[in-house]
Image: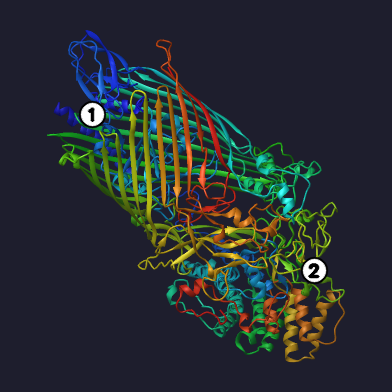
């Protein structure tokens, strides 16, 4: 940890300690020396050494050495380093100055709080800050992966190894019914960004605002939590070039255990087609990927910069899937007017080409007849792919190879910030930012593809969309030293953000030739025949906010922070345009008040905050009309328009009120430290598309604010510097989260006249044969995530299912016999990291686990019944005694608790001789997902936090339907990475 | 220094002032949507709005929809469970066995379609009345009549339903009416609309309610009056049918098949048709419901069928020798692709009569769960055009002239078993079907005649109830109590409204 650079911190410290008036004289002298760890004497690389009150400074080299030309008259040097107390030392007359920093001063670390920063010791809310050196290692393509398991209370999961699939992120359980469940992403001060638009190599730190007292400053968008990304910046004084390169080998980890060809023949009842095919082998490969990242950073007295370029070429473990991403970023800071004016500019651009493949191929690879060959040249109508004609049954290799499904994303983000110090401590800042994302999707189904294409004689689809937003804000900050160790920091601001979305798409089939792919929709004869589809749309929305915050520090013993944001959104109804979101928190350092044995630091924190979550779409509060079909009028069809919504002038945000108690602790000379947090959240005014009677309403559902959700939990983190000497180091960090309660209190409101009716069963299992089979019960007054179904009791003598007679009417297995048969939400999550250093060798491993959640294994629910062997391959676990049709029950619900080795890295730092241009060089080997310990029999035991059904259709209750493992899950994968870090 | 600071603060304040104006405005800008502010202003938009009352009819044919429950609950159709296909919690088997529940999709689906129609009529009447524009006045009586047509089906299927005629009502004030009250409501609404609704029968009334549609629904209402109210109304039924016949607007087509071909729009027998269209008005999905997966190659379909709805074997066998309607209405035997090659079924079961080559057999081995995949005569009544999409282009006859003739015949026969006109009308239908004339009408003959003529037109259940045959034991089905002649109200309605009482049996 200490051997690494934290350039963000350096940048921050430069700003903090640079004072307006430099005291120039012309004579100079050169000071040299070594900066070391006060505990073990190890050199500290890239520690910052500056002359206080000037821009003059440097950083230490690989051996902890520095050399700095200081103006004559300089009396002091200031030395700072991540995790250590900043020291100011008198120079005296000597030109050699060796300094050792005392370790353990974690309290001085900088934490990003949104519209500002704080030192860790001043923090009174639940905020977790993760620095670059603590990020997850290895095959990381998405910034979410950097944090997986690192932050207590932050659940990040992605089932399967699809490189193009995003991660589901939830903070502190389920806090919404119909609004956005993922935290707000703020990238370099711009709220509402996409994590994928930042390359993981460019991130300096990620801060997570977990409780309402911290996130209230983000008002209507703070309720799901806030993730603040800070990108790396340049440091004045020394130019550095860094290169990181990786080669990644990715293979399939887990699939579904179906019969192989021999087993299929032995089972009997199937159609032996004469071949032996392992469809999983045919559909997968060893994905070979490589990534490159090059950055240049440095600066002079007034200017600092960082320029980086990243390239990733990723092959998925399934054939034809992958992506190529190229990303460039420039961060520049310029000071002027005696350093009172600071201008910062960021420019970032990303281009990503994705080969998405088709998720359905995984389902069909599982159920395709293992005695079918992959190719049968006599089936010329399917280009020689072997294809049996059955319902819901397609050659998976043909799906992937014959058709194409691609997406191109281009993102451009630019922003400029100016800060001017009006008088000492009073700063006025202005910020403008623009983000633009263009997304083009193109799909083509070949004329000879039995999957979709042959039906339509070739089918092409193209969708182009543009999402853009502009943000402008102004802030005024005033930092006052009240004397006597007391200080007050004030912030006031205004912010305006406007989002615009538009899109155009077309779909048409019936092509003369496959030559065009998806690139010539005009050639689709469907358009001439009236069968083509075209759509376009445009919408926008605006957010306007006024905000303020005050931080009071009384002698580093008592801290109080209060913030408020008054914010309005055009998405809200006319009568509820504006809301007020307050947050307040306080902390007491107990160890300052009394001498508590063994404890170096013990700080108690209490916070309360109110935050919001806005509707996902614009115009929901308005009475709108739309096409409801076509009406045959006088021999022609005319488009008939009817209501498609009801007006709701009172539509507003979901309101979350949360209460957090935390205790920060440090013992053993700060070598053991961490925090304990308890949270209790209540979200009401949930946004739901609520069914309403017609009449009196014009339309059958209205978006309203209704109901309440509660969640409580406990978080525990521990960092331990177990061994720290010149030969060996071992640090261990653990985070544990217990979800104590997550209850849907109500979804009714008698004042509004809306009655949910106690419960509703949602999330249909689906075709074939299991429509009208709900999997989830949403129930007022009960836990969220209830899995719902029949209770399995056995198989009768004649091979029929026996299901419990829950309603006691003498017959089991009826709809009225369904009951709660599990819960899809985790009870606890664990992350445990261990880092070791033995001289030049470093070793790190990270274990991650989730416990207490159940999953519905839909593969088993469909394909574990022998009577389908005539149509579909079945699971090897199928019971030959069963003759009944598949029928979902508790038999198919499994405890999916798991513990996995998420990543392990072994690295070797080369001894770089002085003067050959290299600053450092390291090679490493990382393995991701080496093993998973679980009793779950499906593809991936990781929690499914919401369900969008099999076809990805929108689910009004998405966040309330966790725990369903659908059939289209991409296989889980394991990756080996060989990497190199070079510094010049 | 102080003065300098003042200037700086002034500059900031001025700057804020400039932004202040535009930067607290949160009105929504609408681009690709129509809101209450910019709709309902021209004649074209009024017609477009009126259309919503008719587009509800596209849901009449559904899976199962209204037509489906009329056919599958009767002796005509069955949806067997073939392996896991069409198990769907057993509700298709329950529909055949008449053991449906108040939560089954069949119960909820038809209720939703029909009440959706009622509600849309009420909404448009309310909106047009508020608009008070001369262009929309003629729509009011048409909408009232269409609402009564929707109520006719509600009366037939659910019986004791709430009558709602206003739009701005409190849901809690809605009360349930008895079946007899609903009957009286439908009768009075239809008879009072007779004077106001156009008698024209031309392109402008195709697919819309005119006077002939009203008289046809009145015929059906009176013919079933004994079931609905306990009091028969045979004479009124005969008279209403005669009113349609007397217009001279309709004639039997020379060929039975002509009514069901792809381009059947404007058939001389159609009194009220749903103008389904593969592009503009989807929903008529018979080939998907009935054909085997492999049948895609027979018709070059642009989708893969679902292998479900099949004819009950006894019904298939009930046609007389020489009845051309048997071959018209059903698909049996070996199946070929468009090139004349036998279609191979790679999922053939041991008991499929000739193995992988696809052959539809009238016999179905069991209702489920292991009904064989090639079993069952399929629905062939409506032409499946080569290259058909999932949505047929054929129009669906809700009410057809042949039905009017048979209804008049039945009404006359009920009053006088030896009625000569009745015999003549029945024989007109038989002759076109390639059958010889009969000299006497019996109840069984009349029900069979209606079944064979009107198969898959949504009358099966109503007819069997009137003939007292609906609940009898049949293949894979026990005899049921007579209360099964009414469907239950959806459970959600019962739960939501304390005033509602569930129908007996449920």
Q: Secondary structure at mark 1?
A: strand
Image quadrant for the C terminus of chain A? top left
Is residue B261 shown left or right of residue A144? right
From the image, tell me which residue sits under label 1: A421
Q: Which mark is residue B362?
A: 2
Name the residue nearer the viewer: B350 or A418.
Answer: B350
Residue at the spot 81% in from the left edge and 56% down from the top edge: B356
Q: Is residue A94 above or below residue B409?
A: above
Q: In this orientation, does residue A699 appear?
A: no
Residue B183 position (above or below residue B275): below
From the viewer's perspective, tell me whether residue A936 is left or right of residue A5: right
Q: Nearer the viewer, mark 1 or mark 2?
A: 2
Q: Front-most of A205 and A871?
A: A871
Residue B288 in the image, given as x and y percentages of width and height: 70, 59
Q: Is residue B170 visible?
A: yes
Quadrant of the drawing holding the N terminus of chain A = top left
Chain designation of label 1:
A
The answer for which chain carries disc 2 is B
SS assignment at label 2 = loop
Q: Which of the 4 image quarters holds residue B367? A: bottom right
């Amino acid at each position: 940890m200490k051997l690494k650079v934290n350039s963000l911190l350096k940048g921050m410290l430069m700003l903090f300690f640079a004072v307006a008036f430099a005291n120039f004289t012309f004579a100079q002298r050169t000071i040299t020396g070594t900066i070391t760890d006060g505990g073990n004497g190890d050199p500290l690389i890239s520690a910052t050494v500056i002359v206080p009150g000037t821009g003059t400074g440097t950083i230490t080299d690989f051996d902890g050495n520095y050399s700095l030309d200081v103006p004559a008259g300089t009396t002091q040097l200031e030395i700072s380093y991540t995790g250590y107390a900043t020291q100011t030392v008198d120079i005296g007359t000597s030109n050699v100055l060796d300094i050792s920093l005392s370790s353990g001063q974690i309290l001085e670390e900088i934490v990003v709080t949104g519209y500002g920063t704080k030192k860790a010791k001043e923090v009174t809310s639940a905020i977790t800050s993760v620095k670059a050196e603590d990020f997850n290692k290895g095959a990381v393509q998405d910034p979410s992966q950097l944090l997986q398991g690192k932050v207590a209370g932050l659940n990040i999961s992605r089932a399967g190894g699809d490189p193009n699939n995003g991660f589901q992120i939830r903070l502190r359980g389920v806090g919404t019914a119909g609004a956005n469940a993922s935290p707000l992403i703020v990238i370099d001060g711009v709220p509402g960004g996409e994590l994928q638009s930042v390359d993981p190599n460019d991130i300096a730190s990620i801060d997570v605002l977990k409780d309402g007292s911290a996130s209230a400053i983000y008002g209507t968008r703070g309720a799901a939590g806030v993730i603040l990304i800070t990108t790396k910046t340049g440091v004045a004084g020394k130019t550095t070039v860094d290169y990181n390169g990786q080669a990644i080998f990715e293979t399939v980890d887990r699939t579904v255990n179906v019969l192989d060809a021999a087993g299929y023949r032995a089972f009997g009842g199937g159609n032996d087609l004469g071949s032996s095919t392992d469809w999983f082998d045919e559909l997968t490969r060893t994905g070979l990927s490589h990534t490159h990242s090059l950055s240049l950073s440095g600066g002079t007295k007034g200017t600092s910069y960082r320029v980086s370029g990243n390239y990733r070429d990723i092959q998925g473990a399934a054939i034809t899937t992958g992506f190529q991403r190229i990303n460039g970023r420039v961060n520049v800071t310029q000071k002027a007017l005696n350093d009172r004016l600071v201008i910062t500019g960021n420019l970032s651009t990303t281009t990503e080409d994705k080969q998405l493949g088709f998720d359905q191929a995984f389902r069909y690879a599982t159920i395709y007849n293992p005695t079918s060959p992959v190719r049968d040249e006599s089936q010329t109508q399917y280009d020689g792919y072997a294809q049996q004609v059955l319902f819901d049954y397609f050659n998976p290799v043909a799906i992937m190879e014959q058709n194409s499904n691609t997406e191109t994303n281009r993102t451009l983000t630019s922003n400029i910030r100016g800060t001017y110090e009006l008088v000492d401590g009073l700063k006025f800042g202005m910020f403008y930012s623009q983000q633009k994302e263009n997304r083009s999707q193109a799909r083509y189904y070949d004329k000879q593809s039995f999957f979709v294409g042959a039906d339509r004689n070739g089918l092409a689809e193209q969708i182009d969309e543009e999402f853009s937003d502009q943000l402008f804000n102004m802030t005024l900050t005033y930092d006052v030293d009240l004397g006597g160790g007391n200080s007050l920091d004030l912030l006031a601001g205004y912010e305006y953000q406007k989002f615009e979305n538009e899109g155009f798409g077309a779909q048409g089939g019936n092509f003369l030739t496959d030559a065009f792919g998806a690139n010539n929709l005009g050639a689709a004869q469907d358009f001439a025949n009236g069968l083509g589809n075209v759509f376009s749309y445009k919408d926008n929305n605006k957010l306007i906010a006024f905000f303020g915050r005050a931080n009071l520090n009384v002698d580093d013993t008592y801290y109080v922070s209060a913030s408020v944001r008054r914010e309005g959104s055009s998405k809200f109804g006319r009568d509820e345009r504006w809301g007020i979101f307050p947050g307040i928190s306080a902390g007491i350092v107990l160890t300052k008040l009394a001498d508590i044995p063994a404890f170096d630091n013990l700080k108690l924190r209490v916070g309360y905050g109110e935050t919001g979550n806005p509707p996902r779409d614009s115009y929901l509060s308005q009475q709108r009309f739309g096409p409801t079909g076509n009406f045959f009028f006088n021999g022609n069809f005319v488009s008939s328009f009817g209501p498609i919504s009801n007006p709701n002038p009172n539509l507003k945000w979901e309101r979350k009120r949360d209460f957090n108690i935390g205790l920060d602790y440090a013992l053993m000379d700060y070598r053991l430290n961490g925090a304990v947090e308890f949270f209790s959240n209540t979200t009401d005014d949930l946004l739901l598309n609520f069914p309403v009677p017609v009449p009196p309403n014009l339309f059958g559902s209205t978006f309203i604010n209704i109901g309440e959700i509660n969640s409580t939990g406990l978080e525990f983190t521990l960092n331990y510097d177990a061994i720290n000497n010149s030969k060996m180091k071992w640090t261990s960090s653990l985070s544990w989260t217990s979800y104590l309660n997550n209850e849907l209190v109500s979804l009714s409101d008698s004042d509004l006249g809306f009655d949910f009716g106690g419960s509703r069963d949602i999330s249909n299992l689906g075709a074939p044969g299991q429509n009208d089979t709900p999997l989830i019960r949403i129930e007022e007054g009960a836990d969220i995530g209830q899995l719902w179904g029949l209770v399995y009791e056995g198989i009768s003598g004649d091979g029929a299912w026996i299901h419990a007679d829950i309603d006691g009417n003498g017959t089991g297995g009826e709809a009225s016999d369904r009951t709660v048969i599990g819960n899809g939400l985790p009870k606890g999550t664990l992350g445990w990291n261990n880092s070791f250093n033995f001289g030049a060798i470093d070793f790190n491993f990270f274990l991650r686990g989730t416990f207490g959640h159940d999953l519905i294994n839909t593969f088993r629910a469909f394909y574990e019944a022998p009577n389908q062997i005539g149509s579909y391959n079945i699971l090897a676990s199928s019971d030959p005694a069963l003759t009944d049709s598949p029928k979902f029950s508790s038999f198919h619900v499994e405890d999916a608790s798991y513990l996995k080795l998420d990543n392990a890295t072994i690295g070797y730092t080369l001894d770089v001789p002085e003067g050959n241009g290299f600053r450092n060089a390291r090679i490493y080997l990382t393995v991701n997902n080496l093993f998973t310990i679980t009793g779950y029999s499906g593809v991936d035991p990781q929690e499914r936090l919401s369900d969008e059904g099999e076809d990805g259709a929108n689910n009004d209750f998405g966040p309330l339907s966790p725990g369903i493992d659908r059939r289209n899950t991409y296989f889980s994968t394991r990756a080996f990475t060989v990497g190199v870090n070079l510094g010049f | 220094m102080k003065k300098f600071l003042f200037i700086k603060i002034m500059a900031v304040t001025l700057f804020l002032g400039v932004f202040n104006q535009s930067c607290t405005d949160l009105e929504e800008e609408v681009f690709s949507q129509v809101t209450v502010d910019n709709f309902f202003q021209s004649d074209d938009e009024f017609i477009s709005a009126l259309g919503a009352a008719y587009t509800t009819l596209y849901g009449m044919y559904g899976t199962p929809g209204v037509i489906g429950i009329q056919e599958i609950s009767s002796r005509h159709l069955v949806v067997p469970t073939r392996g896991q296909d069409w198990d769907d919690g057993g509700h298709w088997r329950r529909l055949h066995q008449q053991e449906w529940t108040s939560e089954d999709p069949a119960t909820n689906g038809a209720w939703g379609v029909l009440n959706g129609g009622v509600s849309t009529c009420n909404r448009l009447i309310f909106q047009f009345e508020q608009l008070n524009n001369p262009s929309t006045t003629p729509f009011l009586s048409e909408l009232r009549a269409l609402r009564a047509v929707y109520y006719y089906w509600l009366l037939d299927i659910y019986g004791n339903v709430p009558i709602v005629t206003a739009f701005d009502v409190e849901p809690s004030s809605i009360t349930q009416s008895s079946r007899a009250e609903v009957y009286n409501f439908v009768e009075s609404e239809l008879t009072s609309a007779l004077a106001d609704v156009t008698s024209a029968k031309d392109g402008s009334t195709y697919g819309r309610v005119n006077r002939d549609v009203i008289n046809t629904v009145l015929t059906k209402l009176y013919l079933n009056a004994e079931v609905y109210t306990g009091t028969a109304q045979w004479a009124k039924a005969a008279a209403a049918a005669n009113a349609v016949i007397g217009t001279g607007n309709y004639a039997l087509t020379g060929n039975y098949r002509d009514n069901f071909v792809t381009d059947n729009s404007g058939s001389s027998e159609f009194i009220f048709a749903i103008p389904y269209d593969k592009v503009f008005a989807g929903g008529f999905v018979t080939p998907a419901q009935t054909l085997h997966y492999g049948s895609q190659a027979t018709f070059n379909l642009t989708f893969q069928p679902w292998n479900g709805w099949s004819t009950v074997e006894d019904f298939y066998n009930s046609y007389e020798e020489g009845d051309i309607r048997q071959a018209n209405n059903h698909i049996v035997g070996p199946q070929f692709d468009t090139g004349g090659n036998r279609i191979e079924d790679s999922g053939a079961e041991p008991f499929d009569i000739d193995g992988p080559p696809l052959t539809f057999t009238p016999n179905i081995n069991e209702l489920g769960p292991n009904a064989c995949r090639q079993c069952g005569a399929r629905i062939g009544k409506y032409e499946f055009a080569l290259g058909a999409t999932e949505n047929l282009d054929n129009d669906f006859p809700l009410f057809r002239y042949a039905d009017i003739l048979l209804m008049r015949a039945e009404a006359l026969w009920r009053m006088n078993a030896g009625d000569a006109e009745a015999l003549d009308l029945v024989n007109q239908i038989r002759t076109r079907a390639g059958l010889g004339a009969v000299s006497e009408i019996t109840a069984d003959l009349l029900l069979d005649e209606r079944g064979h003529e009107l198969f898959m037109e949504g009358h099966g259940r109503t007819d069997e109830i009137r003939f007292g045959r609906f609940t009898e034991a049949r293949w894979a089905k026990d005899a049921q109590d007579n209360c099964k002649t009414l469907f239950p109200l959806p459970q959600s309605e019962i739960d939501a409204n304390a005033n509602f009482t569930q129908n007996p049996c449920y």
